[in-house]
Amino acid sequence: MTMSYLKGLIYSMERLLKNKKFDDIDENLKFIEEKIAYCAQKSGRKYEDIKLMAVTKTVDPVFVNHAIEKGVKLIGENKVQELLLKKDSLMESEVHLIGHLQTNKVRSVINHVNMIQSVDSVKIAQEISRQAVKYNLSMDVLVEVNIGREESKHGFFYDETLEAIDQIRAMNAIKVKGLMAIPPANCDEIKNRHYLSGMYKLFIDIKSKKLDNVSIDILSMGMSDDFHTAILEGSNLVRIGSALFGARNYN
């Protein structure tokens, strides 16, 4: 067996696997869109009222671009370093940072995202504001709520959120566009619904106050395992990774 034959065989196998992955993404996207449409209708809304975010953590740009070609308009990255490595390989789309952001990384990412969903402290909001002013831009943000009061997670506690927004909305070059939350993992559906419905109540309460420099339009909650429930409980932006791209490869 010659070396050229082996290389050809490896190339053929890689192409076959890639095509299979494309087909899987197509099927998954169709299922997700149908589920979103169904849940939107059940909650008295339309499919167009719900934003689908493709979470691209560990996903090769070739598969992200395939999803964009198939109609995905919004992608979310968890880590600044991965976002910066991928950005030149990705087709045009709206990009949000959804993972915890350290203050020393704000400068690196401020010019490369349309929104930062993970504003989990006043300190990080201050740095986003400082860098946005420096680069002469305005940054849309979501305030992250630690809805389960988990020590292992970042974000404001439920009863701290309004005070935090009051401080953030006074900052330059930063605009609060809504809330983001991740309910505790591995809780049953009843508890999950409790957390999700609590977030919706907070969302509506803050929205009704009509605060200056605050446009509470986005409630980002729901991921691969619970996006259907999140929509039924009021979410209008769902963050879906493994249900679209398959299990993550951390190698």
Image (cartoon, rainbow, N blue to C red):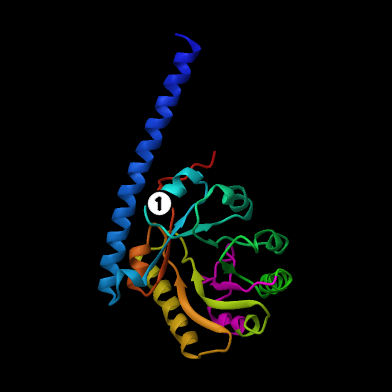
Q: Mark 1 Cα within 10 Å, few/some/many (few <14, many 20+)?
A: few
Query: Does residue 184 appear left or right of residue 35 in this picture?
Result: right
Residue 109, picture quadrant: bottom right
Q: In the image, what residue occupies the spot 51% across and 90% down?
A: 210
Q: Residue at x 50, y 91 (%)?
A: 209
Residue 105 in picture, x, y percent from top left: 69, 59
User: Is residue 146 located in the magenta-colored stretch of the structure?
Assistant: yes
Q: Which residues are magenta?
A: 136-165
Given residues 242 and 48, the one toward you in this image is 48
Q: Quadrant of residue 139?
A: bottom right
Q: Quadrant of the C terminus?
A: top right
Residue tagged 1: 69
The answer to which of 194 and 141 lies nearer the viewer is 141
In the rendered structure, the answer to whether residue 128 lies left or right of residue 140 reads right
Residue drawn 67% across the image and 75% down it: 122
Between 149 and 81, which is closer to the camera in this rendering? Answer: 81
